[in-house]
Image (tube, grey):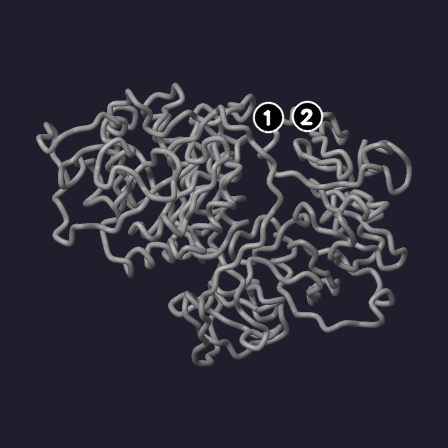
Amino acid sequence: MRSSPSVPRSRLRPAARHALVAATAGAVVIAVLATPALAASTATVGKVSNPPSQAASGMMPAGAPDAARKTSSQSAPAFKAAASAPYLLGTDVSSYQHPAGAAINWSLVAGSGQAFTVVKATESTDYTNPYLMTDVLGARAAGLLVGLYHFAHPEFSPTAQADYFARQINGIGGTLLPPVLDLESNGGLSSSALISWTSSFLTRLRLDTGRVPMIYSGPYFWSTSMAGSTAFSQYPLWEAHYTTAASPQYIPGWPTWSMWQYSDGSFGSPAAVPGIPANVDRDRFAGTKAQLLALAAASRPGVQPPFNGTATAAQYPDGSFVRVSGDPHVYVVAGLAPLWVSSWSHVGRPQPVAVISLAAFRTLRSSPLDGTFLNDVLTGRVYEMAGGAPLLVTSWTAFGGAQPSVRTDDWDIANAGACGTLCSLLNKPRDGTVLRAAETGQVFVVAGGAPIFVSTWAAFGGPQPFVNVNQLPIQNAGAGSWYNHLSFLPADGTVLSDSSTGQLYVVTSGAPLIGNVTTLGATPFTLVDHNAIVNAGGAGVWAHLA
């Protein structure tokens, strides 16, 4: 897998993405509620300051011991060749496969017999592949199964990198192969420190996504930089070992490999992949198409996998209760999303519970639909969902009177932003969420957790979808207690794009500072009103930028 530092990072606007998975419902029972067992955050190894501003020039670059082409006369022990060979074929791609911005023809790729592809998503905490969404959507449309990988920099924080990677995974959603940690650089760490770093990254990524990650590495790197550790066998192995042999070199700790990168495109048959305008890594999967699909759906025991949002209200009406077969956790459905119920007393009394399959559970949403009202029975407060976060309802008048609401466990509200897949509520609305203050008609776009005033839709190409909310949560943003689901100023590091000029700004101490377009071009940004930049530091509605 490669990326090229010479490829400009063009800015991409978000694209809609969905995948269809059928839902099923089962028998009705009264379930015994389980006590949550949330894993603690892992310790940070290294630091997050000064991450690399350019993408790595290659994955297993020429000259690396694991990239050296080998013949069948390997000196080291090899994995036993699978009896089911030939294997499913696949590729992995990055910006390197888009020379001079050339597009990949995914229909031709699929037609050449490829069953899957793995797309580079991120590197360190400052690079997102500018072709990520284009390639994911194109490959999916052509019928390929798709995965994402993160090129690791162990000299920087593992948890910050895992979080950065997870935002792309969770934002894309749908059926994905396990997220991949591309581990081929030790970042100057000792073997023991690198083992600790790797454990921290994988643990955090599992918490962030609910997925069991896959490890990509080579036998030489693993035996030296990782000291031949056998502590990671619970994670699928994607081995990089370029050879014409029937199987790659054996890596202790794994009974077998799941994927094998056997060539960088410089040899093999055929020599190139139709539809890809550059040399491309060649991969094999050790199994059938059904097994590959199963790998794409797999999740770690005890943690639910990501949701794809294809469920309907007819299947899961608001206020219905579900649990996954074999899992004691009970959830109340609100806006087609599951919210954990820690005790029946928190939602009134025991209720009938539908036992559903894990596949059916996956069809729910990762957070409730905008405009869903949640009723915290214990406190008596009601919240409206906006961009994944609960905003306090201070008056029903603006909504034309009281609206139907879903009885919700207070634990979900109190732990919004830290409840993982048990409730999937966010602490602040997603960037780009548009809020309209019902009492005044004023419109704000959320950036870095703060409401930025929109004075005109002209530069946005016309009116945008919005969530009608009360004025007070916006007016009192960051004031404390139940108003903390909006911040007064955007979080530092938030990237803003002037809707009129396209200039990028990085928020520092609440103020928009002009950023380097080349460096920030592929960084997620939020479109804001030009006047909000011009009037930063003003009074009233302009005060949400310093």
Residue at point 50% right, 36% down? 129
Instruction: Return the residue nearer the eye: 478 or 131.
Output: 131
Q: CA distance from mark 2 to mark 1?
A: 8 Å
Q: Is residue 16 above or below residue 94?
A: below
Q: Is residue 98 above or below residue 34?
A: above
The residue at which mark 2 appears reads as 515
> What amino acid type is highlighted by mark number 2?
Gly
Instruction: Give residue 419's position: percent from left, percent from top.
Output: 56, 52
Binning the other alpha carbons within 10 Å of mark 1 as few (below 14), some (14 to 19) or many (20 upward) gives some
Instruction: Return the residue nearer the eye: 473 or 133.
Output: 133
Residue at point 57% right, 48% down? 418
Residue at point 43% right, 32% down? 96
Q: Are marks 2 and 1 in contact (CB under 8 Å)?
A: yes
> What amino acid type is highlighted by mark number 1?
Thr
> Which image quarter holds the C terminus?
top right
The residue at which mark 1 appears reads as 519
Instruction: Return the residue nearer the eye: 312 or 155.
Output: 312
Q: Is residue 256 above or below residue 188?
A: below
Instruction: Give residue 117's position: percent from left, percent from top.
Output: 37, 46
Residue at point 58% right, 50% down? 15
Left or right: residue 447 versus residue 256 is: right
Instruction: Return the residue nearer the eye: 108 or 44.
Output: 108
Instruction: Give residue 393's position: percent from left, percent from top.
Output: 78, 61
Q: Is residue 371 above or below residue 181?
A: below
Left or right: residue 506 versus residue 357 is: right
> Which image quarter holds the N terminus?
top left
Task: Provide the secondary structure element on which disc 1 rests.
Answer: helix
In the picture, residue 488 is in which quadrant? top right
